[in-house]
Amino acid sequence: MPEQETPYERFAPDFEAFVESTIKESNTAGIAILMLHQDRTWAQGFGFADVDKKILVTPQTLFFAGSTTKSFTSAMAAALVESSEHSGVDWNTPLADLIAEDFVLDQNSPEGRYATDHVTLEDALSHRTGMPRHDLIWMNGDVSDREIVRSLRHVPIARDLRAKWEYCNNMYTAVAHSISKTLATPFKVLLKEYIFEPLGMKYTTYDLSDAQDLASKDSKIELAQGYLWDSQSKQHTLVGWEAMPAANGAGGIISNVLDYGIWLRHLLKPTNLNAALSEKAVNAMSTPRMLLEADKSMPYVGPQAYGLGLFSQVYRGREILQHSGAIFGYMASMLIVPPTKAEVQSGNTNGGWAIVIMQNSYSLASQIIAWNLLDTLLETPGPERFDMATVARIGQAKMEEEMQPANVLQRLFGKTDLTSDAQRVLEPQSYAGMYEHTAYHGVEVSTTPPPIAGDIGVDDATKLYLSPSGPSMSCAFWASLHHVSGNWWWAHRRFGRPSSWITDGALKVQFVVNSDGLVEGMNFQAEPSMPNEELAFFKKLE
């Protein structure tokens, strides 16, 4: 059985200097890096796990791993598919066959009615269900997997089943719920019994309290704090563990790079310890299932695809399997370069590499560092190396430009000059109150900034603010509302106190006012990827 204490080496001094420079430029609080090749492991920490206490990141430091959890959920689905006790279940089994009462999609559209009966395990895990993100379902409330799945009937589907790749966290929650219900065991227990314990991933959990318990019992283990960079104060601001949503199949794993190294080594060379850890499961996960629209900023050659919990691309003649994750101040990236077919046929099954990077700030540092390592491993000539740092700078400048008010107005409303537009219908106080949506839960509109906003939300132009309502919220998001015309506003949505070019967004808001001049509700762009910018109605509560 693999052990956490496997010896590891430090990286070369020139690479250390590159990492230090990268995290400084990107304002990344701390980062841990691991690389595997053959029987060698390199691992090292940089920066701080806790900025205030000056606790350094080490390879043992724990981080929230975000959507890299999806590869584990896919492996558990493979265990169910291969289970002799459930021989009728395969990748083409509809989710409705497993959780019929819970898995019901939008019954007001033919696409939703058809998808309800026909979405399979494979469809859900390869993001081809036609359902967009609808992340507010799980971001805005402390909700169980079952509650998340049952909320899907109250949100619109975007397109036909299998028509287009569309990333959807909630479908992974549906799969996790279906596995747990079918095997009559909590999902966190299944992960521990099928994957964590057999592989020896003894510092990996699916629960925040379990991770905190591990850290309290072992002086070598520290659970990193999560941070957002405040460009105004030039400081890292704490997100707080209380802002973390519950694990839900799409995300939730907390681990360190050493444990993830064990997982990646298994994906490189399957251990065949059980059905979840079999070569058959790894092949199922890595087989492309759905083509993606090509990202022209990236250097991949040919089609880009998604398997089950893993992206599949080709770079410089080598297959690249990878997935990243981000959750409220934490980010993770894992990347696998499998052995070539020729290497495998010759008996050299140790010909691949793997990289995992975890950090506790929103930035593209992990991507920049991963590409540097990848080009080094592939011995890419200097002029041909991919310059991810420049791509990141261009991306940041573009996103910051798009969030300029004039550009927001042009993009959302087709205008930049509001001097001739109608004034708002009511005074700001008339819009204030609690609003509720069956799936997205409650939000509050107020004339004063929510506590999380601090003084960043106070300015002459802002008259209203939107934030989650109630003590059960699990996500620190809020928005300042800016008047456009009549009952139309736009929302500058933020996660955490400071703005972040990675996560900020501009969304449409329209208040609904009846003939008596009373606000009945609010149409809010809760899911930006819906065709025709479809808005969701939130009813104003008395």
Image (cartoon, rainbow, N blue to C red):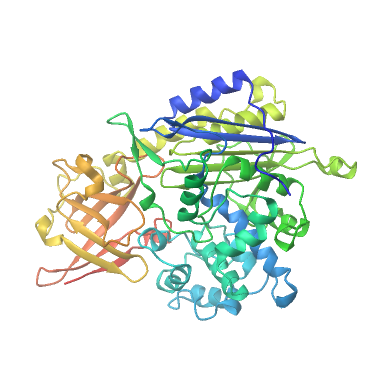
Q: Quadrant of residue 50?
A: top left
Q: Is residue 51 above or below residue 166?
A: above
Furthest toward the bottom, the residue is 101
In the picture as drawn, the residue positioned furthest to the right comes out as 346
Residue 396 position, x and y percent, is: 42, 34
For the point 53% across and 35% down, which residue is it? 366
Nearest the viewer among 26 and 223 is: 223
Residue at 60 percent across and 51 percent down: it is: 292
* In the rendered image, the vertical position of residue 164 relative to residue 298, given as above or below: below
Which sits in the foreground, 196 or 402? 196
Looking at the image, how many numbered discs can be counted on the residues? 0
* Residue 538 falls in image quadrant: bottom left
Where residue 187 sits in the image (x, y, percent)? Answer: 56, 65
Left or right of 424 in this view: 373: right
Relative depth, front residue between 396 and 193: 193
Query: Which image quarter: residue 437?
Result: bottom left
In the visual, does 48 lie left or right of 39? left
Q: Position of residue 15 (x, y in %)?
A: 60, 22
Q: Is residue 471 left or right of residue 208?
A: left
Residue 540 visible? The answer is yes
Is residue 290 visible in the rendered image? The answer is: no
Quadrant (top left, top right, bottom left, bottom right) of the C terminus: bottom left
Q: Position of residue 152 (x, y in %)?
A: 45, 70
Please name the residue shown 72% across and 71% down the image.
83
